[in-house]
Image: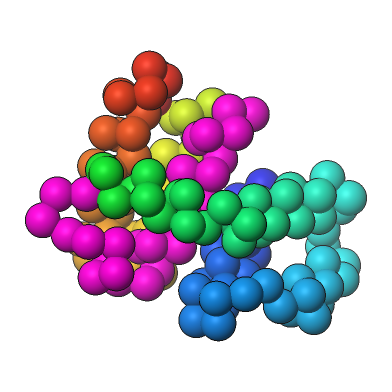
Amino acid sequence: MRRASREYVFKLVFEYTFYGKENPDTLELFLTDADLDDEDKAFIRDCYDGVSENADALKAELAGKLERYTVDRLYRPDLCVLLIALYELKKGETPAKVVVNEAVSLAKKYGTEKSGAFVNGVLAKFVRENGQSA
């Protein structure tokens, strides 16, 4: 169910990137989904709050990992996936390999045909530079 929870977080963060602020109504709508248990709801709330509250710092960190791109020029789904993954990697509660694999899956689903490889490359660089194993 964690995969579905990450997809909910992706959708919330995607909306957040358009408005630049949290929408509590949208969050509560997602959290009332009958298929989510309390652990999934807590995960969604934590990730969404973590990304939205730390968006500027996460974007700054992301900017340092990009080559030939700027954060502002990233395809929005790729940006959202990367922000979520960076938050999870920095938090350190989920193995890096799982975070990267889940991020690549989301990028492939919502991004372009090159999104999976792009996201994988950026996150691999982050993992390598931070001494995590993927």
Q: Nearer the viewer, residue 115 or 80?
A: 80
User: Seen in the image, is 27 located left or right of residue 105?
Assistant: right
Q: Is residue 11 visible?
A: no
Q: Residue at x 10, y 56 (%)?
A: 68
In this rendering, the answer to whether 10 lies above or below 130 is: below
User: Seen in the image, is 11 located left or right of residue 131?
Assistant: right
Residue 59 lies, in percent from the top left, at 40, 55
Q: Residue at x 54, y 44 (%)?
A: 87
Q: Is residue 31 magenta?
A: no
Q: Residue at x 38, y 62 (%)?
A: 79
In this rendering, the answer to whether 35 lies above or below 85 is: below
Q: Nearer the viewer, residue 55 or 119?
A: 55
In this rendering, the answer to whether 104 lies above or below 26 is: above
- Which region shows up in magenta? 66-93
The type of colouring in the image is rainbow
Residue 18 lies, in percent from the top left, at 50, 81
Q: State whether the magenta stretch is mostly helix, strand or loop.
A: helix
Q: Residue 73 sits in which quadrant?
A: bottom left
Residue 134 lies, in percent from the top left, at 39, 25
Q: Residue 10 sits in which quadrant?
A: bottom right
Q: Is residue 90 magenta?
A: yes
In this rendering, the answer to whether 100 lies above or below 37 is: above
Q: Is residue 42 visible?
A: yes
User: Seen in the image, is 99 located left or right of residue 134?
Assistant: right
Q: Residue at x 35, y 62 (%)?
A: 78
